[in-house]
Image (spheres, rainbow, N blue to C red):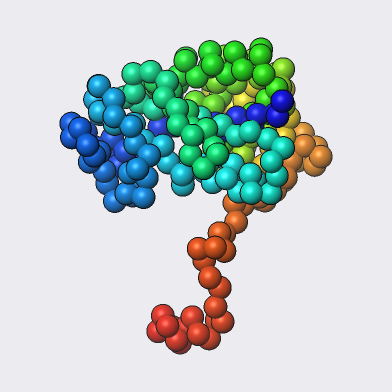
Amino acid sequence: MKTKIISILGHSPGPGAYKESKNSKNPDLGSSNIADKEHYIRINVKPYWVGFFKNDFHVKLATSISKHTDDYEFECWRPYLGCDKIYSKKIDGITHRVFPAKKLKVPFVNLEYSNLMINKLNDYIDNKKIIVHLQGYHDQALDYLLLKSKLDRVPVLATQRGMVSPEMEYINNLKFLGNAAFEQINSPKIDFLFLQSKNQYDFYSKKYGEENCRGPFMDGANFNVIKPVDKYVAREKLGIP
């Protein structure tokens, strides 16, 4: 049996995915989601459609890795405000799952969470061979998931994607103190960090050891889409001296 890599985003899709449409044949989408129109499914509650997106961070990464090895099965999970139950769809060999979510917004807390996702994750931990990749670090939703799940029992990777570090900031701004405390509590559950910020890599590689961190680690460019050209040709095309 292959190991499953469960890659998890901590947030719902952007506003373009929530344009309410009662159209029974096609979702009413913003231009940002037009390429994924074929991967929406109809539901019976607002916003009447649930989408699965091939260009999300976790999906693009899973798709890229799967081109180089068939040793793993990939599932890409996310919370989804507005959906009424768990929905899944297999696209290009990757299993997408979305989970009903709620929003808690109070001072210093902007938390989107899905108890169904946490329950499903704990069931996987109990019954399957998995690796978990959290697509976000310093993310309140993923901090909550770490706190409530059994992730100390499986390998866990986390990728920092642009958010500030509460542990680096709370000394100068006490609003980060609570998040810094959560990260301290959760840190034993994370086995490896990918850090896109050089400052954060310097900080966390000293704290946890260079063997447990990689950075600065960017996602890179897709050269099937981006075709490099000679810089003189590029300047001429763009009218740049």
Q: Give the quadrant of residue 84.
A: top left
At 31% from the left and 38% from the top, the residue drawn is: 17
Image quadrant in which the N terminus is located? top right
Q: Is residue 57 above or below residue 137?
A: below
Q: Is residue 61 above or below residue 21?
A: below
Q: Judge whether residue 195 can be spotted in this image.
A: no
Foreground pick, 230 / 59: 59
At 30% from the left and 42% from the top, the residue drawn is: 16
Query: Image check: 138 left or right of 201?
Result: left
Please give the count of numbered marks on the rendered protein. Answer: 0
Image quadrant in which the C terminus is located? bottom left
Query: Image check: 71 left or right of 209?
Result: left
Q: Judge whether residue 119 can be spotted in this image.
A: yes
Q: Position of residue 87 (x, y in %)?
A: 41, 24
Residue extending farthest left:
22
At 42% from the left and 20% from the top, the residue drawn is: 86
Q: Is residue 114 above or below residue 48?
A: above
Q: Position of residue 125 (x, y in %)?
A: 65, 17
Q: Position of residue 214 (x, y in %)?
A: 72, 45
Q: Give the quadrant of residue 8.
A: top right
At 53% from the left and 70% from the top, the residue drawn is: 227
Foreground pick, 94 / 216: 94
Foreground pick, 119 / 106: 119
Foreground pick, 205 / 80: 80
Q: Position of residue 210 (x, y in %)?
A: 80, 42
